[in-house]
C-alpha cells in the first residue's frame, strides 16, 4: 500500500513521527510521504525513525493563492539545503503569523473583542503556527463569545478573508522546482469540506499552475469518487502530469484513515502513482547530501553564518540594534557537523584582537559590570571574522579535504580525527545502533565513507565563497559565525 499525503504534530496532525511510522506499518503501507502544512519540521525525525523495509519521500504542503482562489501545492523529493526552497518555507511560516494576527485585529475591529497580549502570544507562537485557528476559537469560547469552536470559527474567523496573505502558488512551485522537487496540485476539486471547483474556474486555475511549472496532480484523494478520480486522471494524461495520491490523514483530528486514496474502497498500487517511479529515479541519480549545508535560517540547533556590519565599534558588537545582517545570504550548519568537521579550522583562524571581537560583552541589570567575551564562543554569540580570515579557513578546509581524499591515516588529519570517527552516526545504518564502536571500528567505517565528508567540504566552501562574493558586492567586510 501507498499514501503520499498525511500530517504530523509538526503541523495540524496529532501523531508524533515515530508513532505515525508504527501506524503505517500496522496499516501495511510501505511507501509514504508526510506533507505537513508549510513546514519541514518532521523530515529529520522521519528519516531517523524510518525502518529499512519502508520508503519515505520528503514532502510539504504549501497553502497558497492564485488570481482564481486559494489552493494547496504539494512538494515532493526536495533538497532542503537549497536557499530558494528554505526561504519559501520560512516565508510561509511568517505569512501564517501575519494571517493569525490579521484575524485577531479583525475580531477586535468588527466585534470589539480584545485578546490579551498574553493570549495573542499563546495563539500565534504555538509551534508551527498551524493551530492558531483552533486556539483562537478555543479562546473565544472560553471568553463566552461562542458556544462551540465551530460556531466561533463560523461567526468570527471565516468572515475575514486572508487568502491574499498567503504566498502565490507560482512562488511555491518555483521554489520546489529549484530544490529538485516535484510540485503537485493537492485535491484539485477541493479538499474535504471545502467548496468544490469545476468548469471554467478549474480550467483557469489549472492554466495558472501549469504556466508556473506544475508537474503533478493528486488524482487519488480520500474524498473523491470514481467519476472525480477518472476525470482527474484524464486531465493528468492530457497535460502529461505525474499522478499522485494521498489520504490527507491527520490522526485523531480528522476522520480519514491511512491509505484511503478514494471514497469507494479501491486499493491504489504504487504503479498507478506515476510520481513514485520518477521520485525514486531522481533520488537514485541525485541522492540528498548526508551532511547538510542549508542555505537559509534553520531555527534548530545550528551554527549560522552570514555577512554582517557593526554600526558603532565603540558599542557592544553583540547588540542586535548595532548590527546590520545580510540575512538573505545566511547559511545554517548543524551543531554536530560544525563541531565534527569545521570547528578546528574556525578556532585556529579566530582573531580575538579584532575590534568587533574585543568589544563583545555580557551585561545584566543586576550586574552593571561588563563581562567581556574573549575567545571563540559557542552559544548564541557572534564570532566575527574578516573576509581574509575566512579565506584562510577555506584554504585550511580545502587542504584538509585534499589530505583526506589521499590518505585517511595522515597525521595532518588528527585535528579532525575525533569528528571523522563520529561519521558513522551520520550514516542511516548506524543511527540507532546501541553498541558503541571502538576507535578502530569507527576509523574503518569513516575511511570507507569519507566521500560524504569530502562532499560536505566542497559544498560548504562553495556556499561560503558565494556568500562572500554577495557580501563584498554589498559593502560587507565581516562574516558572523553564531552558535546555537
Image (spheres, helix red, strand yellow):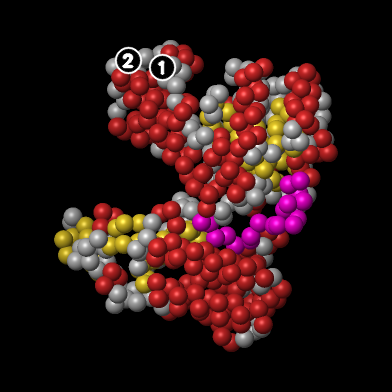
Examine the rendered structure and indicate whether residue 275 appears above or below residue 83: above
Residues 342 and 232: in front is 232
> Farthest residue in the bottom direction?
411
In this rendering, would 158 be left or right of 22?
left
Any mark on residue 111, and which? 2
Answer left or right for 204 relative to 299: right
Whole-percent x, y for residue 313 in the image: 22, 66
| Quarter that holds the N terminus | top right
Q: Which residue lies furthest to the left in this view?
A: 368
Separation of residues labelled 2 and 1 (CA atoms): 8 Å
- Report x, y in % for residue 66: 54, 29
**Contact (Cβ within 8 Å) of mark 2 with mark 1:** yes
Q: Position of residue 126 (x, y in %)?
A: 44, 37
Q: Can residue 297 be seen in this view?
A: yes
Task: Provide the secondary structure element on which disc 1 rests.
Answer: helix
179 on left or right of 57: left
Residue at 21% of width from left, 57% of height from top?
364
Residue that label 1 marks: 156
Residue shown at 37% from the left, 14% from the top: 145
Q: Say which element carries label 2.
A: helix
Quarter of the figure with the C terminus: bottom left
**Where are the magenta residues, as a range?**
278-295
Question: Does label 2 or label 1 sit earlier along the sequence?
Answer: 2
Amino acid at each position: 500500500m501507498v499514501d503520499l499525503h498525511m500530517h504530523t504534530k509538526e503541523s495540524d496532525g496529532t501523531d508524533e513521527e515515530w508513532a505515525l511510522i508504527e501506524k503505517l506499518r500496522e496499516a501495511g503501507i510501505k511507501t509514504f510521504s508526510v506533507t505537513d502544512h508549510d513546514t519541514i519540521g518532521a523530515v529529520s525525525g522521519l528519516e531517523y525513525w524510518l525502518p529499512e523495509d519502508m520508503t519515505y519521500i520528503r514532502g510539504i504542503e504549501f497553502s497558497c493563492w492564485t488570481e482564481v482562489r486559494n489552493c494547496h501545492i504539494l512538494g515532493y523529493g526536495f533538497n532542503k539545503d537549497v536557499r530558494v526552497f528554505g526561504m519559501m518555507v520560512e516565508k510561509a511560516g511568517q505569512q501564517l503569523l501575519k494571517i493569525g494576527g490579521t484575524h485577531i485585529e479583525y475580531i477586535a475591529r468588527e466585534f470589539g473583542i480584545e485578546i490579551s497580549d498574553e493570549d495573542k502570544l499563546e495563539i500565534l507562537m504555538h509551534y508551527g503556527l498551524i493551530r492558531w485557528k483552533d486556539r483562537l476559537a478555543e479562546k473565544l469560547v472560553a471568553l463566552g463569545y461562542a458556544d462551540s469552536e465551530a460556531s466561533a470559527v463560523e461567526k468570527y474567523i471565516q468572515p475575514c478573508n486572508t487568502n491574499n496573505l498567503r504566498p502565490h502558488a507560482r512562488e511555491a512551485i518555483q521554489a520546489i522546482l529549484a530544490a529538485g522537487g516535484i510540485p503537485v496540485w493537492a485535491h484539485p476539486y477541493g479538499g474535504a469540506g471545502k467548496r468544490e471547483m469545476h468548469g471554467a474556474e478549474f480550467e483557469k486555475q489549472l492554466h495558472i499552475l501549469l504556466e508556473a511549472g506544475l508537474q503533478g496532480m493528486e488524482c487519488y484523494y480520500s474524498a473523491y469518487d470514481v467519476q472525480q478520480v477518472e476525470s482527474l486522471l484524464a486531465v493528468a494524461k492530457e497535460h502529461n502530469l505525474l499522478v499522485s495520491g494521498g489520504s490527507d490523514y491527520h490522526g485523531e483530528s480528522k476522520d480519514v484513515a491511512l491509505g484511503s486514496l478514494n471514497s469507494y474502497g479501491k486499493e491504489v498500487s504504487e504503479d498507478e502513482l506515476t510520481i513514485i517511479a520518477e521520485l525514486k529515479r531522481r533520488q537514485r541519480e541525485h541522492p540528498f547530501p548526508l551532511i547538510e549545508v542549508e542555505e537559509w535560517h534553520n531555527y534548530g540547533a545550528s551554527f549560522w553564518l552570514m555577512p554582517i556590519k557593526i554600526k558603532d565599534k565603540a558599542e557592544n558588537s553583540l547588540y542586535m540594534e548595532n548590527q546590520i545582517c545580510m540575512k538573505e545570504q545566511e547559511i545554517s550548519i548543524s551543531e554536530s557537523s560544525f563541531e565534527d568537521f569545521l570547528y578546528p579550522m574556525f578556532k585556529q583562524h579566530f582573531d580575538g584582537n579584532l575590534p568587533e571581537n574585543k568589544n563583545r560583552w555580557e551585561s545584566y541589570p543586576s550586574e552593571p559590570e561588563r563581562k567581556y567575551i574573549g575567545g571563540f564562543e559557542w552559544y548564541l554569540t557572534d564570532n566575527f571574522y574578516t573576509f581574509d580570515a575566512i579565506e584562510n579557513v577555506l584554504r585550511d578546509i580545502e587542504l584538509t579535504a585534499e589530505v583526506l581524499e589521499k590518505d585517511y591515516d595522515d597525521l595532518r588529519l588528527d585535528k579532525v580525527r575525533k569528528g571523522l570517527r563520529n561519521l558513522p552516526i551520520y550514516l542511516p545504518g548506524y543511527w540507532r545502533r546501541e553498541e558503541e564502536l571502538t576507535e578502530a571500528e569507527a576509523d574503518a567505517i569513516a575511511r570507507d565513507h569519507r566521500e560524504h565528508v569530502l562532499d560536505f567540504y566542497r559544498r560548504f566552501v562553495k556556499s561560503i565563497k558565494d556568500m562572500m562574493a554577495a557580501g563584498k558586492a554589498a559593502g560587507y567586510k565581516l562574516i558572523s559565525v553564531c552558535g546555537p
